[in-house]
Image: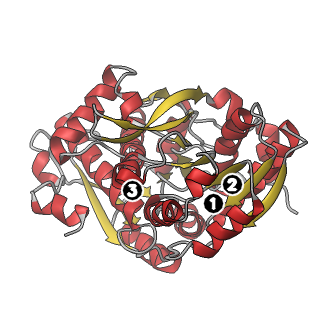
Amino acid sequence: MSIVNWFVALGFGFQVGAACAQTGEPIKIAGSFDLSGPAAALGQDAFLGAQFAVEVINKRGGVLGRPVALEHQDNGTNPQRAVNQATALVRDGAVMLISPISSGSTLAVSKTVSAKMKVPMCVAVSASENITGKDFQPYLFSMPPTTYMMMRAITVRLAKQPYKRYALIVPDYAGGRDASIRFKEFMKELNPQAQIVVEEYPKLGATDYTATINKVLAAQPDYVWTQVYGSDLLTFSKQAAALGLFKQINNKFMTVYDGNTLKALGDNAPVGSEGYQLAPFNHLLKSGVDARDIVTRFKAKTGGYPSDWSLLAYDCVTAWANAANAAKSTDADAVMRSIERTSFNSARGALRFAKYDHEVEAPVYIGKVAQSKEFGQAVLDIEDVVPASITHPVEAVIQKMRQPE
């Protein structure tokens, strides 16, 4: 049984039943989630976070005194299916969309559904900089730092180290390619002596990384940076450990992690290697009352700590609810004006959106993998919290992205 089916089987539907304090017809929000396919692990986490947010909102009085109901479909990590499903969900009355997981699907839904049908859409996971940069449209707002922001954060850290020979392993999709381009651009700027000795672009959902790992070992890099994530990272890490990659490079390795992937890695977690996260529950638990409340209530409800993707999807729903209540309306234009004007509370602190790209001004968290007795799993011990003031591109850079080529 998948985690989503398990969750629903326990009765956590989070729709009208929790809304006893509200009156009137439920306000529909919706998402075409990647509940199967290559991005399923992330999609399931995001779905749980959105469901949890709806329950919390309804217990606090709903939106404009009405309950909120979350409708969803499974797009199977297929962009065209995501577009068809999002279109149908909006036509059925949804006034807000949560984006799909893969960047390609998010870009497609943003252009053909959110923009054309004028419905606010929140990006919960996809990180391609084109979403809020080149392909920005005014009904979009985004929770994760973009590839531009993440690459700025990690290259600032790596450029201070003595590494000169880098290997890159990047999934072949829009967000991965964006990340690779920015990694090379920023590294050249910050450490001109650095060189890329090998680049590999395996497909999403790859099952055999042997050839890629052997190419990396043959190149003898000083450091390996990857953007492999989720279930693909589980497959890669198991094969990399079997081929001795982490030992041969002395754990000089970095990728993007989330809490559930670190847990699932178990003994294959490369302790001592580096990583970056977007909402690490173990760190956020120490950061304030709001974070502790969200994380502990999520764990009490689901039995597990929230992954980064669950927390970002939670933020999508609560930020929209906050904006609608502040605007006293679910009208799309009123909500988007409110998004630009107001801040919202999250596990990552009080956050605002930049007006020129609707990108959340959130930090990137960087640290080293460690096995935690406290949490009973591998976690990222956070060493650097890189603020958006360092990573977020200024308006002139964003406007340049949007100029015709």
Q: Is residue 182 visible?
A: no
- State the mark number for residue 323: none
Q: Which residue does the image show at 82% across and 39% down from the upper left? A: 396
Which kind of residue does numbered mark 1 sit on? Gly
Q: Who comes first in sequence, dot 3 or dot 1? A: 3
In-image side of 59 versus 334 (left or right): left
**For discs 3 and 1, the disc positioned in front in the rendered view:** 1
Q: Are marks 1 and 2 in contact (CB under 8 Å)?
A: yes
* Image coords of residue 196 (percent x, y): 81, 56
Q: Few, some or many C-alpha atoms within 10 Å of disc 2 (few <14, some 14-19, many ≥20)?
A: many
Q: Secondary structure at mark 3?
A: loop
Q: Few, some or many C-alpha atoms within 10 Å of disc 1 (few <14, some 14-19, many ≥20)?
A: many
Give the spatial CA distance, label 1 vs label 2.
6 Å
Q: Which residue does the image show at 39% across and 56% down from the upper left? A: 95
- State the mark number for residue 179: 2
* Image coords of residue 358 (percent x, y): 60, 42
* Image coords of residue 71 (percent x, y): 28, 63
Which residue is more in the foreground, 270 or 275? 270
Q: Secondary structure at mark 2?
A: helix
Q: Few, some or many C-alpha atoms within 10 Å of disc 3 (few <14, some 14-19, many ≥20)?
A: some
Which kind of residue does numbered mark 2 sit on? Ala
In-image side of 207 versus 148 (left or right): left
Which kind of residue does numbered mark 3 sit on? Val
* Image coords of residue 101 (percent x, y): 47, 62
Which residue is more in the foreground, 137 or 182? 182
Residue placed under numbered mark 1 in the picture: 175
Image quadrant of residue 212? bottom right
Q: Are marks 3 and 2 in contact (CB under 8 Å)?
A: no
Q: Who comes first in sequence, dot 3 or dot 2? A: 3
User: Is 114 drawn above or below residue 246 in the view shown?
Assistant: below
Residue placed under numbered mark 3 in the picture: 95
Q: Which residue does the image show at 10% across and 51% down from the upper left? A: 17
